[in-house]
């Protein structure tokens, strides 16, 4: 494994070895990662997954680390900071005051926290997401746990064994797949 990790460090900048996750997790976990890479965007996340896969290095993706307990993690830990959000499409009705927004499909990268998502939704006159255990948790770390999120997810883009595929909730296998982004349906904020 050590040789493989040395090869990994040649292909990926900023690899840290035997790194405590204390500074990268909300829980200030004392888990030691055999190696750690911080992916600052989706491209870097995919690149790290690809290279580790090619080298046969096990990977463990973390979001905000609100659920990481104390243990050692072998292989490569990837801290996911892919944080883009965009409106993919909108639905509305044309009235005397122009187009009245009814709902929107919002594409959210997996490293986005509920706090960041809610800021975006409020700014875009969409309903805030109210049902969360922790605002600091990421979408990627919560998707199979939060029943309200499960309800509004339209599609999920995942990385699995070197391939990027788009699936629905029923086909999500969180043990094998890394969540890259999701499309969620959000209603417009009520205006009275
Ligand atoms: C006050 C509070 C209450 C909580 N209540 C609950 C609760 O009731 N039930 C519950 O289950 N949890 C609960 N949690 C734990 C936690 O908030 C949630 O589980 C949260 O969804 C984890 O998100 P995270 O970004 O912190 O994930 P992390 O802690 O970083 O990761 C959690 C798991 O998700 C995986 N993961 C992270 N990102 C991805 C990705 N992109 N693709 C694939 N897998 C990924 C990780 O590998 C790990 O196995 C609570 C936390 C707090 C602080």
Image (cartoon, rainbow, N blue to C red):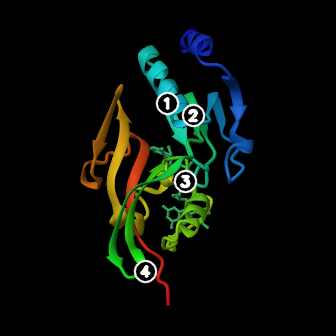
Between the residue at mark 4 and the residue at mark 3, the CA separation in whole angstroms equals 37 Å
User: Mark 4 packing: few (<14 Cα in 10 Å), some, or many (20+)?
Assistant: few
- Mark 1 or 2, which is nearer the eye? 2
Q: Residue furthest front?
A: 96
Label located before the other in sequence (1 or 2): 1
Label located before the other in sequence (2 or 4): 2
Q: Quadrant of residue 106?
A: bottom left
Instruction: Kindly identify which numbered label has been placed on residue 138.
Output: 3
Q: Quadrant of residue 114?
A: bottom right
- Mark 2 or 4, which is nearer the eye? 4
Label located before the other in sequence (1 or 3): 1
Q: State if disc 3 and disc 2 touch (CB < 8 Å).
A: no
Rendering coords of residue 112 (x, y %): 55, 51
Rendering coords of residue 160 (x, y %): 35, 33
Q: Which residue is mark 1?
A: 59
For label 3, being within 8 Å of ligand 1 is answered: yes
- Mark 1 or 4, which is nearer the eye? 4
- Mark 4 or 3, which is nearer the eye? 4
Q: State if disc 2 and disc 1 touch (CB < 8 Å).
A: yes
Between the residue at mark 2 and the residue at mark 3, the CA separation in whole angstroms equals 14 Å
User: Mark 2 packing: few (<14 Cα in 10 Å), some, or many (20+)?
Assistant: many
Q: Secondary structure at mark 1?
A: strand
Instruction: Kindly identify which numbered label has been placed on residue 97.
Output: 4
Q: Is residue 22 above or below residue 86?
A: above
Q: Residue at x 47, y 56 (%)?
A: 142
Q: Is residue 129 visible?
A: yes
Q: Quadrant of residue 20?
A: top right
Q: Secondary structure at mark 4?
A: loop
Q: Which residue is mark 2?
A: 78
State the quadrant of the N terminus.
top right
């Amino acid at each position: 494994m050590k040789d493989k990790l040395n090869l990994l460090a040649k292909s990926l900048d900023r690899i840290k070895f035997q790194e405590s996750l204390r500074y990268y997790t909300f829980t200030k976990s004392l888990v030691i990662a055999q190696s750690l890479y911080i992916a600052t965007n989706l491209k870097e996340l995919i690149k790290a997954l690809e290279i580790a896969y090619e080298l046969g290095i096990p990977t463990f993706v973390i979001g905000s680390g609100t659920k990481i307990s104390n243990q050692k993690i072998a292989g490569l830990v990837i801290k996911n900071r892919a944080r883009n959000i965009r409106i993919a499409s909108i639905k509305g009705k044309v009235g005397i005051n122009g187009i009245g927004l009814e709902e929107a499909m919002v594409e959210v990268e997996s490293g986005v926290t509920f706090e960041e998502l809610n800021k975006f939704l409020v700014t875009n006159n969409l309903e805030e997401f109210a049902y969360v255990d922790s605002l600091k948790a990421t979408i990627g770390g919560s998707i199979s746990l939060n029943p309200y999120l499960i309800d509004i997810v339209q599609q999920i883009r995942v990385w699995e064994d070197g391939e990027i595929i788009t699936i629905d909730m029923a086909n999500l296998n969180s043990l094998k797949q890394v969540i890259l982004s999701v499309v969620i349906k959000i209603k417009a904020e009520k205006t009275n």
